[in-house]
Image: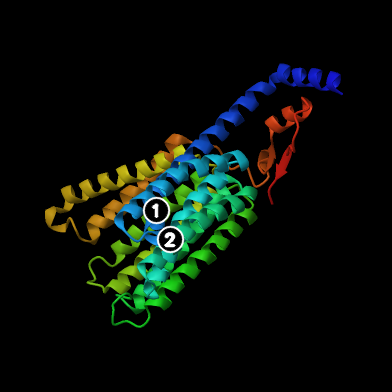
Amino acid sequence: MTWIRRPLAALCCAVGFAAPITAVAAQRSALADRFIRDQTVLGVTVYGPAFALAVADDAISGAAAYLVMAGGSFFASAEATRRVEITEARYLLSRAMATRTTGNLVMLSSLSGSSPRRVAGVALLGGLGGTAAGLAIGGGLTAGEAAATVFGHDLAYLSAVALTTTSDPDPFDERSPSMGRVATTWTLAGLGGYAVGRLYAGNTDHQVTVGDVETLWLTAGIGALAGATAVADAEAEPQTRAMAMLGGALVGTVVGERTLVRRRDLTPIEGRRLALGAGAGALMGIGIGVLTMGEAEASGSRARGFATAGAIGGLVLTERYLQPVADAGRYGALSRLRVDPIAIASTLTGRAGRHALLAFTF
């Protein structure tokens, strides 16, 4: 069959098949490089110190253990990229789940009275386990679904923190018996947020991109600023301020989802430009507020109101300036069907191995 495969491969290249192959290969290489870089940074800052504290009994052996783990993180992650295809979804989830799992487990272990060595061991397992979980879960997701999954965790986690503050302004006071319960609540809220974010992105009628999710953070921040503005002059208690900011953030998230995410397919660059535009508008709003009201009102609700209005105006003007593409819909342009040109070319040329020609995420 070689006499058939080679002409077919040549024909594919003749009709412009080589360009998609090159683009996909370059993207894979860039994602693999970023994955290796982030895992090496984690090795230096998390895995290495945790491993040294967990296994060493003196300074010399601790330094040796640190160097072994820190350097080994590079080679382990490089080997992982040979065995697992690093998609954008896998990259985003592995990085996010590694840091969040480590932080949650260290908090829970510390509050339960574990020894420093056990806490270090938990940190190491949390980082490695979070990375592995991100690689496994991200295999069937688009980049937007992965970003939405992380967004769900963070929003749910911060919401739980705000709600906790309403009942106990200092939940980690040594006299408080609820420290472990509070930390567990935050952790479980974050885990539930993972699921909610995934369900949202996987069951909407519109397409969710990474830029869309970044915009949700922006609108949530503007909403939180609006909530803080509402209680700025009321001498409110910290609990009231936390609830006002939480309510504003949730409203801002819904508004952003309705007005931007449903209508547009934003790229990460466009998402960052929207954030810059909103920030510039907020600065202008503060300046206008000071010029019109005087320095005495610079820290009151009116000044924050000007900042909020400026941020909203900057967001609207920047979105109009960028003119992002309209949302393609959930199945627009077969966005959830992925064709692997490298696998197709490998099949046509008779290269040994298993090749996934098509992939469809549900």
Q: Is residue 76 above or below residue 230?
A: above
Q: Residues within 10 Å of mark 2 (few under 14, many from 20)?
A: many
Q: Is residue 168 above or below residue 100?
A: below
Q: Residues within 10 Å of mark 1 (few under 14, many from 20)?
A: many
Q: Residue at x 41, y 67 (%)?
A: 118
Residue 50 lies, in percent from the top left, at: 39, 57
**Residue 123 tag number:** 2
Check disc 1 and report the residue beneath it: 46
Q: Is residue 80 left or right of residue 283?
A: right
Q: CA distance from mark 2 to mark 1?
A: 8 Å
Quarter of the N terminus within the rendering: top right
- Discs 2, 1 touching: Cβ within 8 Å: yes
> Farthest right residue?
1
Q: How is the image coloured?
A: rainbow
**Residue 350 appears in the figure:** yes
Determine whether the residue tagged by mark 1 lies in a helix, strand or loop: helix
Residue 212 lies, in percent from the top left, at: 50, 47
Q: Is residue 111 left or right of residue 127?
A: left
Question: Between 285 and 335, which is closer to the camera in this rendering?
Answer: 335
The residue type indicated by label 1 comes to Val
